[in-house]
Amino acid sequence: MSPVLQHLGMGLGLGGLGFLLVVGIRGGSDDGPRAPGAHAALMGAAASGSSEREGARAPDDAASLDASADAEAAKDAVVDVAPPPPPPPPPPPIFRVASLVGDTSLAVADGTMGHRPFLTALSAAGVSRSESYRVLRAIAPVHDLNHTSPTDTFHLAKEKTSGRVVAFEYVTSPVDVFQARDEAGTLNGKKLDLHIDTRRVATAVTVGLDLKASLAKAGLEDDLLQRIDDALDGHAELSDVHAGSRFRILATEERLQGLFLRYAALDALEYTPAQRGGSPLRVYRFPPVDLDKWRPLPSVAPASSSAHATHIGSFYDAKGQEPYHGGWRIPVPGARIASRFNPHRMHPTLHVVMPHNGVDFAAPTGTPIYAAASGTVKTAGDSGPCGNMVQIEHNAGIISSYCHMSRFAAGVHVGEHVDTRQLIGYVGQTGRATGPHCHFAIKRNGVFIDPLAMKLDGVRVVPPSQRDEFDELRGGLDKALDAIHLDPPVPGSEPNEPDARPDAAVDAGSDDQVFDEVTVP
Ligand SMILES: [Zn+2]
């Protein structure tokens, strides 16, 4: 543990709780400003090579890189780990209504129950009253149709000429299917004997222009993109995944009658960025998914099929650490804390109690300052002792202040909304300060509180009691990851963006030993 961390942990009384504040070590890739809506846009146009961090790359270069990356991905996209597991015996074919779609003598229809009685739903699907009762009588012995769920679906096939129902399915989940089929003039109902198998997926992906498309080329389903985002959360930003980045992916998928149903888990991930020298990052889900306690199958209505309601679990790196977002950000990531909140601080020369109402983050002039949370700009201007100051009004009567700025970020005006991590200004030493720093203060209902007591970004660590278990799991997953063939880096994806982040260890002049009378109105 670094001295900074130790100091922090002790200062907050959190040192023994398997919990470390991340100030001082939080480096890496996600300190940049986050444009509003960037995350959502990303999911549609991931890795487009056009994020704000990569303006240097010409569009043509990006396109040609994409072409080669995609070619590589297509050539070598899915690499099953050797030796492949023996294929499970093919399940016995089970008749499904959907298989009748090609039969020109039949009309095949689907419906979702909604808040309708069963007979009403069938009537809306063009089934006559008498045929609806026939279906009801066939299904009722195997499933209670008096208690339907709005998301239940049904599928039916009827003769075009007579309107007679020849097959019907009532579906409450992918494995809970109640079927009636016409046999010699009688509709006989039964519950289908459907089984889910799980299997490990081990795949390499070289990212092209569009991450989603690259995953699809590797034979992976859409759902995995969200899971990759979850797994990297805190470790890396999906918005930094550019063309030429490479993944090794270990996932567990569930298959229903031999067809993909869903991912039970993303088990481990290796991410090698195209930029920044490309050192690989590995994360491991811990504890692993317990397939026996795996969440129930989703209901079947289309609207819910894309819902992401899973508990995604924790993904730790090889050191057993998982950075997380606490909701409040350190305004100057990586900066040294030069002076802490201290309501009883004795002034060193005046010998009077002179509270320090905030935290000083020392960093070179020009270092970006980000909004610690979303809110509305309350003031932005020269505030006297506090120098150039921005104040942001948040929910719950909370106001955050950022002082001594050398200048404000463009577009920061009173009344403007700012997002968490939005750039608001740059470190300076305007006002009463002896060196460049950002005095960061928070008032709740008019009273100063310690900003470090807010839910700031932090790092979870695997508890000591589970460390052996984690290491054993990681050992197995590392072997499986190592076995996935990974293409060499795509030429042209060398780092082309100098790391503009300031050196966190720079010992910029500290401040307040002389005076730091901060007045936050
Ligand atoms: Zn201060």
Image (cartoon, helix red, strand yellow):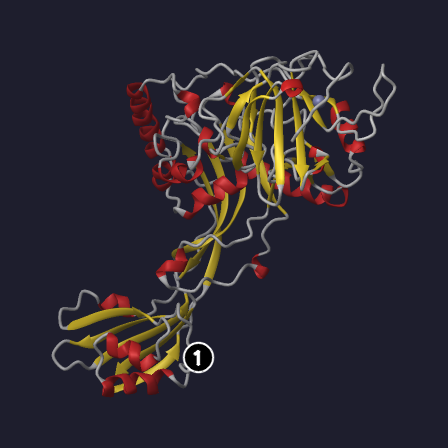
Q: Quadrant of residue 429?
A: top right
Rendered-image quadrant of the N terminus: top right
Above or below residue 40? Residue 101 is below
Q: Whereabouts is ligand 1, in terms of quadrant?
A: top right
Residue at left offset 33%, top offset 84%: 136
Q: Single out the residue that lies furthest toward the right.
A: 351
Is residue 504 positioned above or below 233 on the image?
above
Left or right, 57 with respect to 439, comes to left
Crowd class of label 1 (few under 14; some 14 to 19; many from 20; radius 10 Å) = few
Give coordinates of residue 160: x percent, y percent.
Answer: 14, 76
Q: Looking at numbered disc 1 in the image, what kind of residue is underneath it?
A: His
Residue with the mark numbered 1: 147
Judged from this view, the residue extending furthest toward the left is 161
> Which quadrant of the figure has residue 342?
top right
What SS does tag 1 mark? loop
Asked if residue 171 can be seen in this view, the reply is yes
- Determine the residue positioned at 39% across, 46% down: 222
Q: Is residue 272 left or right of residue 169?
A: right
Q: What is the quadrant of residue 216 in the picture?
A: top left
Left or right of residue 387: residue 264:
left
Q: Position of residue 70 (x, y in %)?
A: 33, 30
Q: Which residue is depicted at the point 58% across and 61% down?
A: 292
Foreground residue among 329 and 180: 329
Looking at the image, can residue 269 be seen?
no
| Above or below, comparing residue 104 to residue 434 in the picture | below
**Residue 416 or 80: which is nearer the viewer?**
416
Query: Percent from the top left, x then y, of residue 25?
Result: 66, 25
Q: Quadrant of the C terminus?
A: top right
Total number of numbered labels? Answer: 1
Residue 378 point in image, percent of width and height: 54, 33
Nearer to us in this view, 516 or 125: 516
